Image: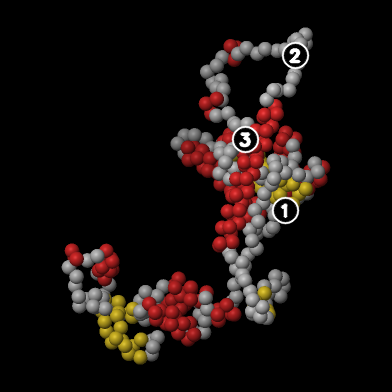
Amino acid sequence: MNLLSRREVIPVKERNSLEKRLYKKISHFNFGTQSIIDPYLGKQMNRITIDGKIVLPWEELEKCIEKFYALSKADGARKLYHQIKEHYFGIGEPMIQRYISNNDMQRQKRPLFSNKAPLIPVDAKKPMERHQVDLVDMRKLIVEKDDVSYKYILSTMDVFTRFVWLRPLSDKSSEKVAAKLREIYSEFGNPKILQSDQGSEFKGVVTRLCKDMNIKLIYSSSYHPQSQGKIERSHGTWKDKIRFDLINSKFGGICDWVTNLPSLQSIYNNAIHSSLGISPYECLLGIKPNSVTQKCNFTNTNLEDITIEFANEESNMTFLPSEDCAERMRHIEKVRSQAFNISKKASANMQKNGLSKYPPSEYNIGDEVYVKFIGKDKRVYRGG
């Protein structure tokens, strides 16, 4: 009190860090004490004031907000803030909102339902068991190529290995989507399950394709992006590569994401995935990808100097199983087992974090609860 009313002045050299901060704040305001009518108590009191506004002790703040809340008959935080700041200093809108959110009257007037079902990660136990597919809108960066305007990217991911396939699309019709999926699955084989969102582009022709290829097509819940969480997170990774090309294009380059899409796919699949501990490439194929330094560079090579040997019909060529074939299979099994365990641990951590953020509600027999009905009748019913 003496410090705020400036009856006590501590020399600068003797002030601790807290006192220094307090003096710094005091210098910007007109502090003092005066006898003033306190609207909260309804009588004249000796109060600390800042620019003529009352500074309440911490223990009286909630009671003051409660008083104004009752007088206004449950106004919102913004309206209460403007009413209170006319008389008091230091009572912010977030503080008022916290009081309202925890107020029983507000819960009855406008109940909030924060209960959420426990998060269940979408997992697979082996490669090519489950795929997720999604469309990425690229209409802000349209690329013209061979008289075709490419506006979308079809992204397909193997859930177990996190291996992705990226294909450019000129439109998002189900015919174009089905054609690209058939192209991918003709080369790599088809999964048992294909998961997509509720978009119309994944119906019609895509449904018939899945039926022809014996693929079970399932749709994610509407307005629930967590169902497609793995593929959605992969988008952010390779989109950063496109942004990198876009930034470089401003310095004289060309941001041709259609041409660069195979390279983006390769970079993503060859990189170590944090949820696997290995690259998607190695998890799917069982071998490590060749590093950049091992790639052949024919830029300065004369094609005439390259010798190509052909086997003639008279040569006695016999194809025998490799001696380390069994060892290779054991290595693949070991790699995938490690990836499965790491992925399982990551899923468990995700569930744990979800429960800590949205803990399940616990009730006792006889507790009054509010039940939310979804439908035409949106009234809230009280039950016992």
| Dot 3 crowding, Cα within 10 Å, few <14, some 14–19, many 20+ | many
Q: Which mark is residue 21?
A: none
Residue in the image at 52% along x and 78% along y? 103
Residue 96 at x, y percent in the picture: 46, 75
- Residue that badge 2 annotates: 317
Residue 184 at x, y percent in the picture: 71, 37
Task: Examine the rendering and report whether any part of residue 255 can be seen.
Answer: yes
Whether tag 3 and tag 1 are in contact, CB under 8 A, the answer is no
Q: Which mark is residue 282?
A: 3
- Residue that badge 1 annotates: 219
| Dot 1 crowding, Cα within 10 Å, few <14, some 14–19, many 20+ | some
Task: Examine the rendering and report whether any part of residue 136 can be seen.
Answer: no
Secondary structure under tag 2 reads loop
Q: Earlier in the sequence, mark 3 or mark 1?
A: 1
Residue 37 at x, y percent in the picture: 33, 88
Residue in the image at 75% along x and 19% along y? 319
Of 155 and 163, nearer the camera is 163
Label total for image: 3
Secondary structure under tag 3 reads helix
| Dot 2 crowding, Cα within 10 Å, few <14, some 14–19, many 20+ | few
Residue type (three-letter) at the residue carrying disc 3:
Glu
Residue in the image at 74% along x and 46% along y? 193
Of 23 and 81, nearer the camera is 23
Whole-angstrom CA distance, mark 1 to mark 2, is 50 Å
Residue type (three-letter) at the residue carrying disc 1:
Tyr
Residue in the image at 35% along x and 86% along y? 38
Residue type (three-letter) at the residue carrying disc 2:
Met
- Name the image colouring: secondary structure
Task: Kindly indicate the quadrant of the structure image that contains residue 129.
Answer: top right
Q: Earlier in the sequence, mark 1 or mark 2?
A: 1
Secondary structure under tag 1 reads strand
The C terminus lies in quadrant: bottom right
